[in-house]
Image (cartoon, rainbow, N blue to C red):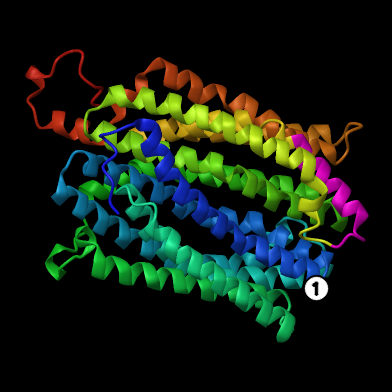
Amino acid sequence: MIRDMTQGSPAKLIWTFTIPMFIGNIFQQLYNMVDAIVVGRFIGPQALAAVGTSFPVIFLLVAVILGLSMGSGVVISQYFGAKDEEKTRRAISTALTFQIVLALAMSVVGVVLSRPLLLLLGTPEAILGDATSYMQIFFGGVVFMFAYNALAGILRSLGDSKTPLYFLIVSTLVNVVLNIYFVVVLKWGVPGVAWATVISQGVSSLLSLLYIYYKVPYLKFLANQWVFDRAIFATMVKIGIPSSIQQGIASVGMMFVQALVNSFGPTTMAAFAAAGRMDSFAMMPIMNLGMAVATYTGQNIGAGRFDRISQGVRATLAMVIVCTVLITLLVLTAGPYLIQIFVSEAEVDVIAQGVDYMRTVSLFYAIFGVLMVLNGVLRGAGDALIPLFTSLTSFVVRVGAAYWLTTTALGYRGIWWSIPIGWSVAMLVPTLRYLSGAWKAKSVVRRQMFATVPAVVVPETGPDLD
């Protein structure tokens, strides 16, 4: 259901928009978690390390297009908030065209570069074959993942966060069944996990496409309505490139850290892979609130309702605090059981290291929450350079801290501590920008509206047109 977020209670709108995304991301994370559980339980710790070490490389190549998708979402949500149906349609068709083309290109690049990138990370020879197979199969079918994410992202920009959830649930169930069948029954090993993921992502993308074509008039294009608007594309790229670079920086940071993890051997690699999956799962509600406030901000800026944005920020930060307290308590009390989802009780060292990672990082989830919410506001406003600078700051601090701390008495534990250190320093960037109010001048829709007025009549207090 398409939702107008420029009217009604900010807290209720953001919360009801977040819940379906959160549930959806739980199922999205189940893709990776089921992969890890099946691999760790039915193949072994080395296979789990192989899947884990390929994740930063996958994230690096995928992050480029995901960043550009963020630029598309900002433009679409602002036109929708401005009630400009024609520009909304043009923005949607433009976004779908370039995202699909980029996804195809990324598929080729990913297949070709999988092994060289794993070698660059210093992946041990014992797991290199499995890691390479997993990555190449994944990237061979990456177009399905991007098709789903592009269509789901457009629906969310229009205020519909429920429909993508339904298809994701179906897809995740397919993934679980195929994982068990390919690995346990057919004994395909790590490649079987990758094939299960690709096939299930194909299901979610097909269901999304059929729904949009038959059920959403806003997205049902006639042949003459499918356009590629160069001006809108330029705006999307202007906003999306900083977001893409931001995602790339984050993933490069993950690769540096993964290379450091690899230097400590398979036990630490397996612990890092298992704890990292649980960590990603734990941070989902925080990230979802950041995504929700970005859509909320975009629509309200398009409608010129700046007064509602500060209300939405306060409400979202309150929700973040509640979520982080509950999640941290869960991690502190149930850490060993969470790691044992991925490995057997006999893997004592893996469990001990994984629990230590989770308990260290979970104490600082509230800082990460503030970072996500304020970055979401800035991104929804079109102020994309600040989140980029935030990510760069986090990258430099985290990687530098990790490599230094591991030379101290902390050893591998320095990798865990580098994560909250990076968050804490990076949080200062969006906080200062939000408090300055300069982001209010970055609106895509309002800037274009003022651009149609002769310069001599633009008031001095108007938005920055540069």
Total residue callouts: 1
Which residue lies most toward the top here?
460
Q: Is residue 192 left or right of residue 42?
A: left
Residue 443, located in which quarter of the rendered image? Answer: top left
> Viewer-proximal residue, 208 or 191?
208
Q: Give the quadrant of the N terminus.
A: bottom left
Whether residue 318 is situated above or below residue 3 in the rendered picture: above
Residue 125, located in which quarter of the rendered image? Answer: bottom right
- Residue depicted at 72% across the width and 41% down the height: 330
Query: Magenta span covers which residues?
Result: 344-360
Q: Give the quadrant of the C terminus.
A: top left
- Whether 352 is among the magenta residues is yes
- Secondary structure under tag 1 reads loop
Whether residue 240 is situated above or below residue 326 in the rendered picture: below
Spot occupied by residue 278 in the image (x, y as percentages of width and height): 69, 50
Q: Is residue 441 left or right of residue 14?
A: left
Q: Amino acid at mark 1?
A: Ile
- Residue depicted at 41% across the width and 69% down the height: 205
- Residue depicted at 46% across the width and 31% down the height: 316
Spot occupied by residue 83 in the image (x, y as percentages of width and height): 17, 42
- Whether 267 is among the magenta residues is no
Residue 383 shows up from this direction: no
- Residue depicted at 60% across the width and 48% down the height: 251
Residue 435 shows up from this direction: yes
Give the residue pinned by disc 1.
43
Mark 1 burial class by Cα count in 10 Å: few <14, some 14-19, many 20+: some
